[in-house]
Every structure is written in structure tokens, then in C-alpha cells.
Amino acid sequence: MSALALPLPEPEPVRQSATSPRPEIAWDEIAQRAPLMVTTMATFLDQQAVSSRPSTVGAFDIALRFFAGRVTAFDPACRSVADIGRRHVEDFKIWQAARPGKRGKSLSTTTIRHRLGLLRTFFERIIEWGYDDAPARVPIFPGDFPKPDEPLPKFLDDPTMAKFMAAVTADLNPRRRLMIELLARTGMRVGELAALEDDAMVQISETFWLRIPVGKLHNDRYVPLHPVLVDLITDYRCTRGPSRSGRLVDRDDGQPFDRRTIHRYVVAVAKRAGIPPIHPHQLRHTLATQAINRGMSLEAIAALLGHRSMRMTMTYARISDRTVADEYFRVTEAVEANYGRTEALPEDAVGSNMRKLAADHRRMLGNGMCTRPAALDCSFESACERCTFFETGPQFIPILRRQRDHAVEQDQPGRIVLFSKLIEDVDGTG
């Protein structure tokens, strides 16, 4: 028997209090137009609630509600999920792109991609699960997703972070200081901080570790603790006394801290430090950037931050590519050495010819001179005659003619033209 073989009660995916504002698109309105479609989506949401986090179920609820609301408004004849086709998806894409987002701007690419991804998952699941009210195929294709932006993580540079940490150290509130120091020195997420258990700090051999609970990626991990954090945790627990909730830090009423409160704490410290407002997640990005800048391996950073895949960690490698930096400074050092040669030249000679910039670096070649400065690498190796630092003269005419004749014998048109031009430049005979 399929998932929808039995009659189902009218769905109530969204439960609101009497004081909650009515959503822009409500399930009861959609149900009046397409009851079967709403029943199918409600059944799916019930299944998601069994295996997914509430935030994930909420995201599915929003995506499905907005999609169903638009489909039934665009095409009143479409009353079931099985009737949904490409034209409905294409209309929804255009409708979403025209909708306002935060601060009056259009919806972000990330939001659009996320909602389309949730809808695609919905169609895949109900087809896989054998729902009666399911389309023959998934109507959303990879080409429907807008190209994602790939911004680099926002982090604090070393001088700014030093100011921030100095302001944290001066905070007289031990709980607030402990919370922000934990964020800055372990790279944990705000939700992980709020869920830390009171006995999260453990000692293994001579090292203290912090057990970070199951969080966003459904995994827990141990991270090493800086001695400063060990002292802060020990002192705070002694001053606070036994925990009422079993958590390391909680509000005065015993409830867990919410993200907004922790965000306000971080912003307040930034204000005292005299730096622009920052988000708590920037402390996580900053720690990762500092670590990779100072030689910590990507594997170790991934373990520290609790990344499931190296693809997440590789984002920080884009911030600090030591190979690019080393190559850049090696080349610029050589270029600056070349620029420095202009100081000893007459004013009318500057820029006239690069070969004149390094007259004291001349080296004898078989058919001329190399004027390349010693600090510059040679890019031509055996093709000296094509290099801008190559210089020849009348004393090399016999050698150049023999090289031209050899090129004629070997039927090498390019070398014939090259040596003929060099001979012409020297004596004008061609």
C-alpha cells in the first residue's frame, strides 16, 4: 500500500500562537484551493520531523508553503503534487527572483538555491517512497540553480584581533569573558557554546581537552584547551558553584543562552576595543585563518572546527595560499632589484632600453652578450637570441652568419629570419 492510500486528516504543518503574525502565505488558504497537495506535503513534513532537526523541518515548511502558494495562484487548476510540471517550476523561479529580501534587496542567491534544493529533495523523496500523489519525474533540474557566490570568510586581521582580545581580557564579567574566550580560542560555533556541558573539560595525560557536543553537523569532538581557558573554566566553576542546568554557562534564570545575546556580547567587546561590530562566527573564521597562516595542516584545522569534509576547510586555504605568497615575494624581490638599477642611470637613459639597466651584469655568450641582472631568473634558457636582455655586435657577425647558414641547411625558416634580422641590425647588410 502506498503512502497516501489511506485518507489523511487536513494538515496543520504550522502551529502559531494567537499573538503570532499571520504568514504571508498560509497553509489553510492553500488547502482551500488544493487540499490533496497540502495533504501530501504535510505527510512529507511529518516524516522529516522524525529524522531531521526542527530547523530543517522549518526550512522545508517555508519552501513547500511558498511553492504551493505560488503554484496554486499561478495555475488554479493544479490541485495536486502529481500535476506539478516544468512550467510551474519555471514560474516559481521567476517569482522568487523578483521577491524582496532583507533590507529591500532581492532574495540572495544562497536563499534561492537553498529553497530549490529543498524542493528537489521533496520531489525525489516522495517519488522514491512511492507516494500516489507524486509526479512521474523530478521537475527541478541542476540547471535551475543559480550559480552560487563563493565569498571568502570574513575574519579579523592580526592587529584588529589583538585589540579585540585585549578588550576581552579587560572584561570584569567572568562568565561573559569565558564565553567569548571560548569562541575565540577554540573556533566553536555559538550553538555549541550554549550547549557545553558542565563537565566538558577533561584531562588526558598532561593535556586538557574540551568536549564539544553534537551540533550542526551531528558530530561531537574534543579540542585541546589553551592554558588560559583551563584557568578561566576552573575559576568560573569555583566562583559560580554547582550548575543548576548541567551546562557550563547559562543565563541567570538557568535557561541556555540564545544566539542574539551572545552576539550582543561580542559586539559590545568590539565596541570597547574600538573596532567595527563583528559577528561571533568571525572569531571562528579568524582562528582558522591564523592557524593556516602559521603552518597548521588542513587536516588538523578540519578536526579542530568539526568539518565533515575537507572541501569546507579548503575555503581557508584560499585566504592564505603560502605558495602564491612565497612565489610573489620571490618575484617582486627580483623585480625591485631591477628597478633599483635606475637610480644610478642618467635621467635621459631611464626607460630607453631594459638592457641598459644592467650593464655591469653582462655575460659572454657564443654570439653576443647577456645583460640580464643576476637577481632575475632566466626564462629562455637556450633561446637567448629572443630575450630582451640579449645584445650582440659587429665582432659576432661571423658567428651569426654561420648560425644563419646552418639554419638554411636544416630548413629552419624561423631561425633563418631570426639570425638574418640580427645581422641586418648590426651591419645593415641583410
Image: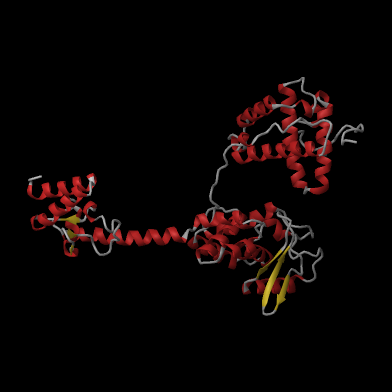
Q: Which residue sits furthest bottom?
A: 206
Q: Where on the picture, by quarter, is residue 72?
A: top right
The correct choice, above or below, for 358 with respect to 23 in the image is: below
- Vertical comparison of 425 with 369: above or below: above
Left of 285 or right of it: where is 34?
right
The correct choice, above or below, for 93 with respect to 307 in the image is: above
Asked whether residue 24 is in view, the answer is: no
347 lies left or right of 376: left
Q: Which residue is drawn at 57% across and 41% down?
A: 148
Q: Looking at this view, is 343 or 101 the one in front?
A: 343
Q: How many labels does the image show?
A: 0
Q: Nearer the viewer, residue 37 or 400?
A: 400
Nearer to me, 274 or 230? 230
- The quadrant of the rendering that contains the N terminus is top right
Q: In which quarter of the image is residue 56?
A: top right
Residue lying at the far right of the rendered structure? 6
Looking at the picture, how far across and down is residue 193, in whole percent? 70, 60
The location of residue 42, given as percent across then percent down, is 83, 36
- As drawn, is 166 to the left or to the right of 260? left
Residue 277 screen position, x and y as percent: 56, 53
What percent of the width, then of the height, locates residue 231?
Answer: 66, 74
